[in-house]
C-alpha cells in the first residue's frame, strides 16, 4: 500500500500496520514535525574531526557519507563512499550531556548577619528530541533512569529533563571494533526505550513507533508500508552486525568472578598504564558521579552551589581529612571496573555498562576494558569445567552403577580404580569434587575423584576400614554404585595468572591430582606451580610415575619428602610442612591449595600467611563424616557449613576461627 | 589554607621575582571585579599598578616569578617573614618557569653565550620554585594564571573558605565542555591527562595538545603516558622529552621525564649535563 507523500491532516490516513517506509528525501519532514512540536533537535553532526551530538535543524547537518574507525585510544572519520546519514557508530558525545548536564546550579544561599537562607534552583528543561540514539544508548538512558529516578530518592533536575525528551532511535547497520553491546545484552537491535525508531536503507528509512507519542508523529509522516523484503533486509543487516561483534566479554557469572578477584595482580599492572585522567568515566553514558562546588562573591554574602561531573579516578574523589580511601591508582581502577560490572547490579539491579565502547576508544592510552575483564575474571572455564554439573542420583536412596576397567595398586594399602560406564555427569565433574561410592551392604563413602576421563573417572582409595578394603579388593569387571559428583571444587579459575602452591601428604594428593592434570593441560595460563608432597615412607608415595612426569616434563616444581627413608631414598626426609617452610618462594602473587590432616593444613596456612598469602587465597579441603553428601543428614556440620554441600573446599577466610579448632 | 577571613580588609602585596609580569597583569585584567577587589582588599604594594610601596606586613602576598638570582634567596625569606598568607602565582613561581630549562644546561656557558658582559649578570645555576625556599599557602598555576581561579582564591580569602582549585586532569574540563580529545581523534600528543586543570582546557579547545603550563597534577602518571606515546605513537624519546620540557618542566614527575628522555634544549655552546642521553639537537653553534 502506497500512501501519498504529501502531508495530510492527522488521522485522515489509514493507519499503517508494522513499520512504514520514509523516503530519504522526506526525512526533513520528521525534523520539521519535531520542531513544530516546540522541540530542539539534538543529533549527529561532523565537528572537530568526529561525529558529535549537537543542536541541528536540517538533514543537511547530518554526517552524510561519513563513517568512523575506532580502536582502543583511537578515533578517525572516514568517507564511506555512499550517502548514508547514520553510517557511523557512537562518537564522543553521550546523551547524558542533555539529560544530566556537566554543570548545573543547585542552591543559592545568602548570609545576612546571623541569618542564613537557602534557595533551591528550580529545575527547568527545554523540550528536546534526540535523533539517532543507538540501542546501547537507549539502554544507557534506562540505566540512568534507574540510578537517578528509579529508587526512593530522585534527582529532580534529571526527572524534568528526561521527561522532556523525545527519542528517535536508529538501528545500527555497522559496528566498531570497540563495540560489545552483544555481550552486555543491550544491542545491536533497538527493542525498547524509544519513541520512534529509524533503520536506514539505501533509499530511505523504515520507521516504527515505540510509544503513543511516537505513533502520533509517525502518523503525520509521509509513509508507505514497508515491504517484506525491506523488513527482512533490515533484520539481516542488524543480525550481521551482531555476528560481527561476537561476544567479546562473556558475562555469565561475571559479577561473582570479578568480585572474587579483588586482590588480582592485574589491578597493579593496569594502574601502571592508567593515567587516572577520568576520560572513561566522563565519556561513559551511565557514569553519574558528581561533585559540589561552592562559589561566593567577594562580600561573602551570597553563594552558589553547583554540581558538576566528577570521576572516581580523580585523587580527591574519595578524600577525607586524613587522606583518600582509594589512595592508589589501582584502587581507583578497581573501584570503577567492579562498580560498572558487578556492584552496580547489587545497587540498581542492572549492569552499569552498556557495551558502547566509549571508555575504550576515548581512553587516551587505549586501555581496553574487555581485555582487563577477561584477564582479571577470565571467562573461559578450565577443563574440567569450573562450573559444577548437576549430580546424578542426588538423593541418598539412588545410585548409578559403574564398572571397574582397571585397578592399580599405588601402595600396600591404596588402590586406584578406573571406572567406566559412568553417567556423563561424572566426566564433567570438577577438580576437588567427590562421589558417594557404595557396595551392597556397606555404608556409602565419600571418595574424592582423582581423575576425570572422557568416559569415566578414577577413584584412589586407601583401605582403612571394611568398606574401603572391600573397594580396594574390587577386580576388573566388578561394579560399584555411585552418586555425584558432589561438593564444590578447587577455585582453579582464581589461580589463572598466579603462582600456585599445592601442599599435601599421603592420600591427600588424590583430590588434587585433577588440579595438576588441568594445569598441565593448560600450563601457560598459570605462573610458577609448586607441589610439596610428603608420605610416611617412599613406598607410601602415590602416583609415582606422574610425580616424575610432572616434575621432569610438565613444568611443575615437585618437592617430595618422607618421614622415614629406606636405603634406596636419596631425597628429603622430614614432614612436608617443614620442607615447605624452608623452601624459597614468594607469596606475593600466590594462591594455595592444601589437603591433609587439619593440623598439617593449619601449619601450612601459618607459613603461607607469613609470606603474605591472604586467608582468602589459601584453600583447604576438609574431611568430615559424610553420609548423604547433600547437606541433609547433618553429620558433616562444621560451624555454619555442611562440609559436603558447602565444601569440601573452603578458604581459610571462610572458615575463620573454626579452622583447626579442637572439637568443632 | 585559610578557614576564616584572613583579615577584615586584608593588606595585599604583589611582588615579583624572575618572571614576565603577565600573571600580575591578570589581576589588573579583572575588569568586572576590580572595583570590588579594591573595596575588599587594601592593595599596599603592586608596582605594576601603583607607585605606592610598602615593606609589609602583608595579610596576603602574591608572589610571581622564580628564584633565579642570588639576591632572591634572602628576599623571599624576608617576604615570607612579613606575610600571613603567601600565594605563588604562575608557572615561574610554582614550578621554576621556562627559565628552569637551564637547570639541565651549563649555566656559565649560557651566560657567556648570551650576554656581552656576563660579569654583570648575577644569576643562580638553577631557577627554582618559591616552594623550594619557603612555605607556600596556596598556588595559582599556569602561564599565565587563570582569572577565574584568581577570583575564586580572592573570594575564598574574604569568606575564609577553602578555594575550590581542583586537582584533576585537564581532560575532565575537555569532557565537561564537550571538547573532542585531540589525542584520540587527531593523534596529537597532549599532556592534559597528567596536567592540573584550571585553564578551561584552552589549548584542546583550539585543537592543540596541552603543553602542561599548569604543571603536573597529583599522582601524575607521566611514565605511563610516556610509555604509551613511545609504543602506540612510535615517537622518539627526545620528542616525548620535549613535551615535558615546557613551562613546568622542573616539577616532578615532568622533571624525571625530561632527565630520562632528554629534550631540554640547550643553548649554543652548552651541553646537557644531567640528561641521561645528551640532546642531539642541542649544541648548534
Image: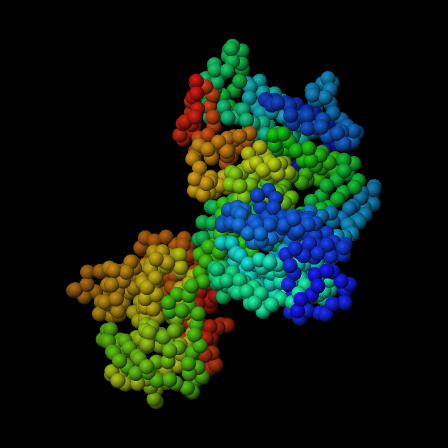
Q: How is the image coloured?
A: rainbow
Instruction: Identify the residue shown where x is 53% and y is 47%.
Output: A78
Residue A437 placement, left or right of B161: left
Q: Is residue A371 visible?
A: yes
- Dividing the picture into quadrants, the one containing residue B87 is top right
Residue A417 placement, left or right of A40: left
Q: Position of residue A208 (x, y in %)?
A: 65, 65
On screen, residue B235 above or below A612? above
Task: Pick whichever, A581 or A148, lies toward us.
Answer: A148
Q: Name the image quarter holding the N terminus of chain A.
A: bottom right
Q: How many marks?
A: 0
Q: Is residue A143 visible?
A: no
Residue A173 placement, left or right of A518: right
On screen, residue B52 above or below B140? above
Q: Position of residue A573 (x, y in %)?
A: 24, 61
Instruction: Identify the residue shown where x is 26% and y is 70%.
Output: A542
Residue furthest left in the image: A567
Q: Position of residue A377 (x, y in %)?
A: 46, 60
Q: Position of residue B2 (x, y in %)?
A: 69, 36
Residue A8 placement, left or right of A178: right
- Dividing the picture into quadrants, the one containing residue A562 is bottom left
Task: Pick whichever, A19 or B229, lies toward us.
Answer: A19
Q: Name the image quarter holding the C terminus of chain A.
A: bottom left
Instruction: Identify the residue shown where x is 43% and y is 21%.
Output: B283
Instruction: Identify the residue shown where x is 78% and y is 29%.
Output: B35
- Dividing the picture into quadrants, the one containing residue B207 is top right
Amino acid at each position: 500500500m502506497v500512501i501519498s507523500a504529501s502531508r495530510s491532516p492527522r488521522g485522515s490516513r489509514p493507519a499503517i500496520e508494522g513499520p512504514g517506509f520514509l523516503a530519504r528525501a522526506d526525512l526533513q519532514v520528521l525534523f520539521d514535525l519535531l520542531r513544530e512540536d516546540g522541540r530542539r533537535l539534538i543529533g549527529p553532526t561532523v565537528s572537530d574531526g568526529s561525529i558529535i551530538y549537537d543542536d541541528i535543524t536540517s538533514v543537511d547537518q547530518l554526517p552524510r557519507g561519513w563513517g568512523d574507525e575506532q580502536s582502543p585510544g583511537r578515533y578517525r572519520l572516514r568517507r564511506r563512499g555512499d550517502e548514508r546519514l547514520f553510517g557511523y557508530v557512537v562518537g564522543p558525545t553521550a546523551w547524558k550531556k542533555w539529560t544530566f548536564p556537566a554543570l548545573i546550579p543547585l542552591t543559592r544561599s545568602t548570609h545576612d548577619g546571623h541569618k542564613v537562607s537557602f534557595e533551591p534552583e528550580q529545575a527547568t528543561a527545554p523540550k528536546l528530541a534526540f535523533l539517532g540514539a543507538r540501542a546501547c544508548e537507549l539502554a544507557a538512558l534506562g540505566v540512568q533512569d534507574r540510578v537517578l529516578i528509579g529508587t526512593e530518592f530522585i534527582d529532580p533536575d534529571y526527572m524534568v529533563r528526561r521527561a522532556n525528551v523525545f527519542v528517535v532511535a536508529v538501528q545500527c547497520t555497522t559496528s566498531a571494533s570497540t563495540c560489545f553491546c552483544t555481550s552486555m545484552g543491550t544491542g545491536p537491535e533497538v527493542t525498547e526505550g524509544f519513541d520512534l525508531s529509524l533503520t536506514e536503507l539505501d533509499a530511505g528509512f523504515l520507521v516504527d513507533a515505540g510509544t503513543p507519542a511516537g505513533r502520533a508523529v509517525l502518523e503525520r509522516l509521509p509513509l508507505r508500508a514497508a515491504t517484506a523484503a525491506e523488513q527482512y533486509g533490515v533484520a539481516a543487516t542488524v543480525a550481521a552486525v551482531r555476528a560481527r561483534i561476537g561476544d567479546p566479554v562473556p558475562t555469565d557469572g561475571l559479577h561473582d568472578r570479578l568480585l572474587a578477584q579483588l586482590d588480582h595482580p592485574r589491578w597493579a599492572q593496569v594502574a601502571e598504564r592508567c593515567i587516572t585522567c577520568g576520560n572513561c568515566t566522563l565519556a561513559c553514558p551511565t557514569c553519574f558521579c558528581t561533585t559540589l562546588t561552592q562559589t561566593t562573591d567577594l562580600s561573602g554574602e551570597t553563594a552558589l552551589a553547583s554540581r558538576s561531573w566528577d570521576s572516581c579516578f580523580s585523587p580527591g574523589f574519595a578524600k577525607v581529612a586524613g587522606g583518600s580511601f582509594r589512595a592508589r591508582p589501582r584502587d581507583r581502577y578497581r573501584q570503577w571496573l567492579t562498580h560498572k560490572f558487578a556492584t552496580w547490579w547489587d545497587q540498581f539491579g542492572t549492569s552499569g555498562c552498556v557495551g558502547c565502547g566509549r571508555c575504550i576508544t576515548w581512553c587516551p592510552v587505549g586501555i581496553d576494558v574487555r581485555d582487563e575483564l577477561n584477564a582479571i575474571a577470565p571467562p573461559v572455564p578450565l577443563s574440567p569445567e569450573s562450573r559444577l554439573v548437576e549430580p546424578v542420583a542426588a538423593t541418598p536412596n539412588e545410585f548409578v552403577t559403574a564398572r571397574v576397567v582397571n585397578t592399580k595398586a599405588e601402595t600396600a594399602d591404596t588402590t586406584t580404580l578406573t571406572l567406566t560406564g559412568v553417567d556423563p555427569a561424572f566426566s564433567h565433574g570438577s577438580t576437588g569434587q567427590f562421589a558417594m561410592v557404595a557396595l551392597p551392604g556397606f555404608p556409602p563413602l565419600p571418595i574424592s575423584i582423582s581423575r576425570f576421563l572422557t568416559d569415566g573417572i578414577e577413584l584412589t582409595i586407601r583401605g582403612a576400614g571394611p568398606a574401603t578394603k572391600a573397594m580396594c579388593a574390587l577386580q576388573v569387571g566388578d561394579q560399584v554404585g555411585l552418586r555425584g559428583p558432589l561438593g564444590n571444587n578447587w577455585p582453579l579459575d582464581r589461580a589463572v595468572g598466579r603462582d600456585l602452591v599445592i601442599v599435601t601428604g599421603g592420600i591427600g594428593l588424590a583430590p588434587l591430582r585433577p588440579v595438576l592434570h588441568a594445569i598441565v593441560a593448560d600450563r601457560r595460563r598459570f605462573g610458577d606451580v609448586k607441589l610439596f608432597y610428603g608420605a610416611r615412607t617412599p613406598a607410601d608415595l602415590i602416583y609415582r610415575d606422574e610425580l616424575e612426569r610432572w616434575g621432569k616434563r610438565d613444568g611443575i616444581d615437585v618437592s617430595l619428602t618422607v618421614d622415614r627413608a629406606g636405603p634406596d631414598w636419596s631425597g628429603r626426609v622430614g614432614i612436608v610442612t617443614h620442607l615447605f617452610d624452608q623452601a624459597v618462594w614468594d607469596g606475593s602473587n600466590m594462591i594455595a591449595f592444601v589437603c591433609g590432616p587439619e593440623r598439617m593444613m593449619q601449619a601450612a596456612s601459618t607459613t603461607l600467611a607469613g609470606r603474605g598469602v591472604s586467608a582468602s587465597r589459601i584453600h583447604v579441603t576438609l574431611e568430615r563424616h559424610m553420609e548423604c553428601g547433600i547437606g541433609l543428614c547433618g553429620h558433616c556440620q562444621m560451624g555454619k557449613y555442611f562440609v559436603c554441600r558447602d565444601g569440601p573446599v573452603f578458604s581459610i577466610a571462610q572458615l575463620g576461627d573454626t579452622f583447626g579448632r579442637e572439637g568443632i | 589554607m585559610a578557614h576564616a577571613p584572613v583579615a577584615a580588609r586584608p593588606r595585599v602585596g604583589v611582588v615579583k621575582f624572575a618572571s614576565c609580569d603577565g600573571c600580575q597583569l591578570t589581576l589588573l585584567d579583572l575588569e568586572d571585579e576590580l572595583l570590588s577587589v579594591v573595596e575588599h582588599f587594601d592593595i599596599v604594594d603592586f608596582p605594576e599598578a601603583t607607585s605606592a610601596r610598602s615593606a609589609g606586613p602583608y595579610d596576603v602576598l602574591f608572589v610571581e616569578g622564580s628564584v633565579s638570582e642570588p639576591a632572591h634567596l634572602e628576599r623571599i625569606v624576608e617576604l615570607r617573614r612579613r606575610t600571613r598568607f603567601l600565594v605563588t602565582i604562575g608557572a615561574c613561581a610554582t614550578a621554576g618557569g621556562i627559565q628552569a630549562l637551564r637547570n639541565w644546561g651549563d649555566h656559565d656557558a649560557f651566560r657567556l653565550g648570551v650576554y656581552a658582559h656576563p660579569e654583570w649578570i648575577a644569576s643562580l645555576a638553577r631557577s627554582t620554585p618559591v616552594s623550594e625556599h619557603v612555605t607556600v599557602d596556596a598556588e595559582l598555576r599556569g602561564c599565565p594564571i587563570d582569572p577565574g581561579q584568581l577570583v575564586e582564591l580572592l573570594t575564598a580569602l574574604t569568606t575564609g573558605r577553602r578555594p575550590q582549585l581542583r586537582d584533576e586532569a585537564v581532560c575532565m574540563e575537555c569532557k565537561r565542555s564537550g571538547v573532542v580529545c585531540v589525542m584520540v581523534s587527531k593523534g596529537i600528543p597532549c599532556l592534559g591527562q597528567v596536567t592540573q586543570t584550571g585553564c578551561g582546557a584552552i589549548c584542546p579547545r583550539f585543537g592543540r595538545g596541552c603543553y602542561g603550563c599548569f604543571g603536573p597534577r597529583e599522582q601524575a602518571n607521566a611514565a605511563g603516558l610516556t610509555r604509551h606515546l613511545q609504543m602506540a605513537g612510535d615517537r622518539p624519546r627526545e620528542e616525548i622529552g620535549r613535551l615535558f620540557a615546557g613551562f613546568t618542566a622542573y616539577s616532578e614527575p615532568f622533571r624525571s621525564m625530561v632527565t630520562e628522555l632528554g629534550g631540554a634544549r640547550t643553548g649554543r655552546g652548552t651541553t646537557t649535563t644531567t640528561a641521561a642521553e645528551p640532546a642531539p639537537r642541542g649544541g648548534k653553534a
